[in-house]
Image (cartoon, coloured by chain):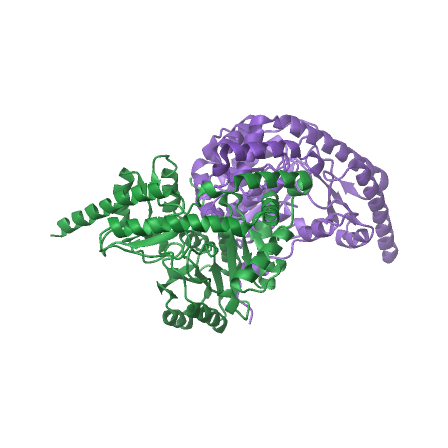
Chain colours: A green, B purple
Amino acid sequence: MALHLAHRMAQIKESEIREILKVTQQPNIISFAGGLPAPELFPIEAIDKVQHLVLQESGTTALQYTTTEGFALLRSWIAKRMNSRLGTSFDQDNILITHGSQQGLDLSGKVFLNEGDVVLCESPTYLAAISAFKAYGCRFIEIPTDENGMDMEVLEQTLKGTPHIKLIYVIPTFQNPTGKTWNLEKRRRLAALATEFNVAVIEDNPYGELRFEGEDLPSIKSFDKTGQVLCTGSFSKIFCPGFRIGWIAGDKNLIRKYVLIKQGTDLQCNTVAQMVIAKYLALYDIDEHIQKIKTLYKDRRDVTLQALEKYFPDSVQFTRPEGGLFTWMELPEGTSARELLLRSLEKKIAFVPGGSFYPNNPKENTLRLNYSNMPENRIQEGLTILGQLVKDYLKDGAEKMS
Amino acid sequence: MALHLAHRMAQIKESEIREILKVTQQPNIISFAGGLPAPELFPIEAIDKVQHLVLQESGTTALQYTTTEGFALLRSWIAKRMNSRLGTSFDQDNILITHGSQQGLDLSGKVFLNEGDVVLCESPTYLAAISAFKAYGCRFIEIPTDENGMDMEVLEQTLKGTPHIKLIYVIPTFQNPTGKTWNLEKRRRLAALATEFNVAVIEDNPYGELRFEGEDLPSIKSFDKTGQVLCTGSFSKIFCPGFRIGWIAGDKNLIRKYVLIKQGTDLQCNTVAQMVIAKYLALYDIDEHIQKIKTLYKDRRDVTLQALEKYFPDSVQFTRPEGGLFTWMELPEGTSARELLLRSLEKKIAFVPGGSFYPNNPKENTLRLNYSNMPENRIQEGLTILGQLVKDYLKDGAEKMS
């Protein structure tokens, strides 16, 4: 007789993207699937030196338990960084270190969501945010989202007409999956609406440091006068993901609640990893490192966009991100990116079909392409093949229709 | 206007033990409070070498994302270790790497508990397990527990008479907080009852490797024919806690559910930490290392028990653990260990009052003493002072009564 699981388990399915990532571990596959940083830029030698220093200077501290809040020097660095780049006014007590920014989403679900509560999100939105919040039994309402962010009229009407809205979840800069960035006016307006309707905003920002062109914009948090907005951040994309160190930042009283809930969840984050990152930040120039990442990713984005122009039919649309890791493609209406994926995996090409990025109403004719993880020649090669596959797929579809 | 939090947040309070731990970071305090391993035994030089090797040999893998399940070599080592020590028959697919064994408890709550479900536990039980499960809105029923484990008659009657029991949570070996160990018969009986009533058992085992005397006993899992029992384990007490690497083990179908739920929770554990521990296990003799820990802790336990005999009044009772990190003290009925703590903190002595280890019915005349973290002379000194404080406290109480 099977054990009785919680109701939520009926909602939790295998993540398509994680399963595809397993396929992509085969060495000869050309993968546009994962959101993986370029491993050749990981500062291995520097980390090696820094790890050694941390263990020699403070080994017994680094290997021992620490506080739930996290390593003070690291929290303090994050606060200053956010203040200078995002227009916040934080100190270390506004920051909780989390196990990747993903844990910030899980803890947000735990802090805010009762079963049946509502989360508003962009359409499409980050796949693993859907999983994180869904575990707390919420419903989602997708707010239509264009090149400049959420449709503020629809958002306001939804806030007016819907009970039990607890969270508005957004990724306003180089969004995952679309690569789109919200404009200034929508950022300001969202903060005002959050205050007016007394709803919390989770401003997820793992990619904001990776701008290739255009001007940095102030965060939604910078327009927040009432403590409605929480921001997540991560070292995964500007340093490396293997350490699983991210953070959530916000109003001190609210962060205190997150600390309490994290205590019962996993006590604290990895002490060594926190001290190693703090030491790296003290001894090395992270801005110089981030510049290297941006230069590389810009080149890869350029090659990607050029190949999309050249090898893909005109009926296919794609975004032109100013930063981050992804571009987003829309095939003609009525097509299925899942069908295309089956064909492309036969040719050893992987990507993520877009349907999973919609909590309620999947647009199956969409797909996400990552451009950060592979060298230019592989991107070229992969997109040449994928472009032909798309043409063939659309032609077969047209023949079936006629 | 304050934001509306989830109902569960009304139940989540500051953890007394974590707050006391903050006080104990003052250098001149003698602390019996935390469950901290002896830092002087952390294999710093070995870890330093191993970290270097991992980065040199496989830096780009170690710093990159990996699978949710965890590093295969490490999972395989854990399966073999459990098979040889605990009588299980696992392979790597029975093992999920977790962010400390604490995360195994949180994920168990997420997989099994609906609001209003019931968790059965020992009385007293592990403080942070109460926090972990409580976040999912469960109720607790404490099962009376003596020197040899839970009262099996009461357990059976409770299983018969109570709807919505989802989990039985136990720490059968060198329990936290009491140091007690279940006998063989109760282990066997619990597995049988779990099958009979189709309830899951979480067998939490962070201390089982640290036996100073007596014979190792088979795990509850070894008597489980139907896949009801899940086991947690941890490298925190046999290696070091700073890496936050633990595991949960069980039936493969059930572990697959845990993997799915962990994906949305935090994607995966720290890749570097997993590879460093796996490399250490390949290059060094962990049994030799554990033997060093056991020798040191046995001496510290002996000094503790001798001091308790010598400096404490006869009206005080305490346990004589055969392993692990803690002894448990009962003061005479009607006294309060919290009051005693206020007096002892003035003398720079810390411990954890026992009340917090009971989810429903605190026995305030109890307290937990850790003996793993301090050298013998500090233990001696601290218990001499604490013994006198107890005598004074009981005398003051007696005078008030008369």
Q: Return the x and y of residue B291 as percentages of the image width and height.
A: 67, 27
Q: Nearer the viewer, residue A31 or A200?
A: A31
B198 or B304, nearer to the observer: B304
Q: Nearer the viewer, residue B327 or A27?
A: A27
In the rendered image, the vertical position of residue A84 relative to residue B251, given as above or below? below
Q: Quadrant of residue B150?
A: top right
Instruction: Say left or right for B18 vs B117.
Output: right
> Residue lying furthest left in this view?
A402
Residue A235 location (% of width, % of height): 52, 50
**Res B361 visible:** yes
On screen, residue A79 versus residue B146, left or right, reads: left
Q: Residue at x 72, y 29 (%)?
A: B295
Residue A14 seen by the camera: no
Image quarter hosting the N terminus of chain B = bottom right
Looking at the rendered image, the quarter that the C terminus of chain B falls into is bottom right
**Rendered view: A148 above or below B70:** below
Residue A394 coordinates in the image, percent (x, y): 19, 50
Total numbered circles: 0
Question: Eyeballing the image, is B230 above or below B392?
Answer: above
The residue at 33%/57% (across/down) is: A319
Q: Is residue B248 above or below residue A337?
A: above
Residue A146 is left or right of residue A134, and the answer is left
Q: Position of residue B285 (x, y in %)?
A: 61, 26
Instruction: Tell whether B351 sits left or right of A175.
Output: right
